[in-house]
Image (tube, rainbow, N blue to C red):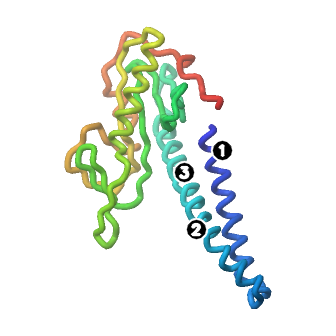
Amino acid sequence: MPKRRANMRFLAAGILFLIAVALFAWRPALHSTLGYILLLSSFPIASLAVRVLASGTSWARGSNGESQVLTALRNLPDNYTAVSNWKLPDTKNGDVDLLILGPHGVLVIEVKNFGAQYECDNDVWVNIKPNGYRVRIKSPSLQIKRNTKAVKSHLRQFGWSGPVQGVLVMRPRSNIRILASSVDIIDWSSIEAYINRLPTSNNIPLTSWFKPDRG
């Protein structure tokens, strides 16, 4: 997928930048004027490397979460289809992590592999630092709502008006305090049972309506 290839390049670039900074730091030439210039110029490179490396690591956690969800769905019958990392055509929105097409219609899944402590109050999400400091983050619940609405709009182009639902899927034992939620939030170990409980529809959307993005 385009997003995955880009993040792999970012990850590789971050590693190379960190290696370059380490080499500069141990050069004997550091005792010369040129060495000091190289050392000073390495600071912004190191800062960029840390950001790039963090981006790559975050992507890796997310990618692992999606694969865990797919593994949890491996026992669904053949009349279910999974579409991963689908990008809505003609928009700059991010990818939809997973779409499950089946007798229930369409289930839009947003996967979050959170490892730190978070709190959810409807559509307000905060990351709680070890020192108690609270940082508001991009709302996963608003994200799944937007994606679900976008998928519904996309399907109208084909005259399909069946059920489209969304769910936020977390890794098991995530440290998330939910005060109130405007969307369904489950862990990926229970995703198959969740799908089996969904009401059935009279028809199943076609996978051809979700052609992978080639951009």
Choose between 50 and 175: the one closer to the eye: 50
Coordinates of residue 13 in the picture (x, y in percent): 68, 58
- Judged left or right of residue 190, residue 33 is right
Q: Is residue 155 above or below residue 88?
A: above
Upstream in sequence: badge 1 or badge 3: 1
Q: Is residue 146 above or below residue 102?
A: below
Q: Quadrant of the N terminus?
A: top right
Give the numbered dot on residue 5. Answer: 1
**Label 1, label 3: how far apart the Cα atoms are:** 11 Å
Residue at the location (48% across, 23% down)? Answer: 80
Decide: marks 1, 3 in contact (CB < 8 A)?
no
**Label 1, label 2: how far apart the Cα atoms are:** 22 Å
Q: Where is residue 150, by image quadrant?
A: top left
**Crowd tier of the residue under label 3, counting other residues whose Cα lies within 10 Å: few below 14, some 14–19, many 20 or above:** some
The residue tagged 3 is 59
Residue at the location (31% across, 42% down)? Answer: 185
Choose between 18 and 202: the one closer to the eye: 18
Per the image, label 3 sits on a secondary structure element best described as: helix
Residue at the location (65% across, 61% down)? Answer: 14
- Judged left or right of residue 20, residue 94 is left
Q: The disc labelled 2 sits on which kind of residue?
A: Ser
Per the image, label 1 sits on a secondary structure element best described as: helix
Q: Where is residue 167, by image quadrant?
A: top left
Q: The disc labelled 1 sits on which kind of residue?
A: Arg
Per the image, label 2 sits on a secondary structure element best described as: helix
In this view, which residue lies farthest toward the bottom? Answer: 31
Coordinates of residue 24 in the picture (x, y in percent): 73, 78
Decide: marks 3, 2 in contact (CB < 8 A)?
no
Give the numbered dot on residue 47. Answer: 2
Upstream in sequence: badge 3 or badge 2: 2
Q: The disc labelled 3 sits on which kind of residue?
A: Trp
**Crowd tier of the residue under label 1, counting other residues whose Cα lies within 10 Å: few below 14, some 14–19, many 20 or above:** few
